[in-house]
Amino acid sequence: MFIFYDIEYLCLLSDVRQLSLIRDDGYKIFVPHLQVQGYSSDIKGKIRNCEESKLIEMLDCYGFDDFLHEHDLINSVFGKGFLFLLHCCKANDIALVIDNTRLSQIALCNKLKIKIISIEMFNREVIRNEQYYNFLMANKDRIMI
């Protein structure tokens, strides 16, 4: 089970028709409702299409304020959106797919004992197709903000 830090990368996987293969291999990808709210209508439309096609599942996570208090994150330098992703991952035992260049975010995940998997490792272990792996790795920096 996975949640993507960079939703644009999830959209790239959809564009190259990998999400159905991922689903068919038994993996589940979740997108917290709150994560999509700040994105453009184009991204929201792609996510809605993925949900309607049952390629991803939308997720509601309750108890965010308790999570912030429990882990002393009320005045964190990290944005509420990122912290909400961490809450969803921790509450549902879901791994966060995150680029290995996001060092401070990874450090917080490690501190909170949240499972993470790099985009590179996700592509190697889940996609398992060398052509797609090379394409996705060559394009990931271009599409992620």
Image: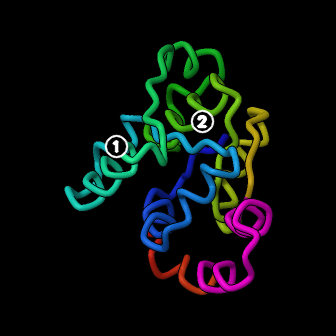
Residue shown at 50%/14% (left/top)?
63
**Camera-nearest residue between 33 and 87:** 33
Is residue 45 left or right of 14 when viewed as pictured?
A: left
Query: In which quadrant of the rendered view does residue 11 lie?
Result: bottom left
Q: Position of residue 60 (x, y in %)?
A: 44, 24
Residue type for callout 2: Leu
Decide whether residue 132 is among the magenta residues. Answer: yes
Q: Position of residue 93 (x, y in %)?
A: 70, 29
| N-terminal-most mark, 1 or 2 | 1
What is the magenta range? 118-136
* C-alpha gap between disc 1 and disc 2: 25 Å
Q: Position of residue 12 (x, y in %)?
A: 46, 69
Residue shown at 74%/48% (left/top)?
116
What secondary structure predominates along the stretch shown in magenta? helix
Find disc 2 in the rendering and name its residue.
86
Find disc 1 in the rendering and name its residue.
52
Quarter of the image with the N terminus is top right
**Camera-nearest residue between 22 and 59:** 22
